[in-house]
Image (cartoon, helix red, strand yellow):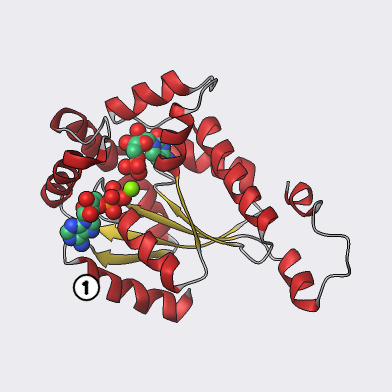
Amino acid sequence: MFGRLFANVSQRVPSLLERVSQIMKPQVVFVLGGPGAGKGTQCSKIVESYNYTHLSAGDLLRAERAREGSEDRHVIETCIKEGKIVPVDITINLLRKAMEETMQQDEKKFRFLIDGFPRNEDNLQGWTRVMDGKADVKFVLFFDCGNEVCINRCIERGKSSGRIDDNWESLEKRIQTYLQSTRPIIELYEKHGKVRTIDASRSVDEVFADVKAVLDKEG
Ligand code: ADP
Ligand code: C5P
Ligand code: MG
């Protein structure tokens, strides 16, 4: 698939750095944590200081839901409202396209923070099916935060986010989905020594200080 990606690289003779970049596999950090744990906030801060592109699965799904002519808008809307996970075929296509577009625009941009994915077994299987061998998952950045703090942050965010799922009813379901479906995925990566856990219940800056320590060491 990344053959397609590199087909458009300009005709001139590429520099050594460009050639090295061209054979670079996408390097991926999965960013997980409960709803409102601060994944998006921390990813934005990472992008300011490190050479990563932030791709939020939730943002991509919301954009697809809003896209005129999208065949998937209804299933996405229902899942989001109900706190359920959208079938992976939809999500993986959006992620793959976003990664390809990013690398097409700038072949040196091969480091990705994939935020809010994989959220369940179906997500993980879809990733393996489509991306195995085509991208390296370096580790999972896990923002660990109690449910109560998560819910309060989302309710607060809901005052201005316009999101259809930042309300008590949806949040109860989102927390259930997180506990039942996402935590086992985090535990699976943990068994392989691939999880970097950060206490996300503290202030944005305190959390970011720990994020920096992880990225400076192995990012
Ligand atoms: P997620 O992407 O994990 O759902 P967000 O980054 O959108 O979470 O954060 C959820 C809400 O909580 C936002 O309104 C954000 O401004 C706020 N927030 C994020 N991190 C913190 C923090 N460490 N302390 C307090 N509020 C936070
Ligand atoms: O990560 P975020 O809070 O933006 O996700 C919002 C919603 O988008 C989730 O509750 C879920 O309904 C949907 N989603 C999904 N699959 C993902 C990520 C998000 O179905 N991998
Ligand atoms: Mg988010």
208 to 113, vertically: above or below: below
Q: Of residues 140 and 111, which is closer to you in this image?
A: 111
**Where does residue 107 sit, x and y in percent of width and height?**
69, 62
Identify the amino acid type marked 1: Glu
Ligand 1 lies under 8 Å from the Cβ of mark 1: yes
Q: Name the residue located 14 percent from the left edge and 45 percent from the top edge.
A: 156
**Where does residue 62 sit, x and y in percent of width and height?**
41, 34
The answer to whether 95 appears left or right of 120 in the picture is right
Residue identifier under label 1: 206
The answer to whether 77 appears left or right of 134 in the picture is left
Q: Name the residue located 48 percent from the left edge and 73 percent from the top edge.
A: 219
Q: Is residue 120 visible?
A: no
The answer to whether 15 appears left or right of 31 in the picture is right
Q: Name the residue located 63 percent from the left edge and 42 percent from the top edge.
A: 130
Q: Of residues 200 and 55, which is closer to you in this image?
A: 55
127 to 25, vertically: above or below: above
Classify residue 160 by image quadrant.
Answer: top left
Mark 1 element type: helix
**Where does residue 136 sit, x and y in percent of width and height?**
59, 60
Total numbered circles: 1
**Where does residue 117 sit, x and y in percent of width and height?**
43, 46
Q: Of residues 170 and 161, which is closer to you in this image?
A: 161
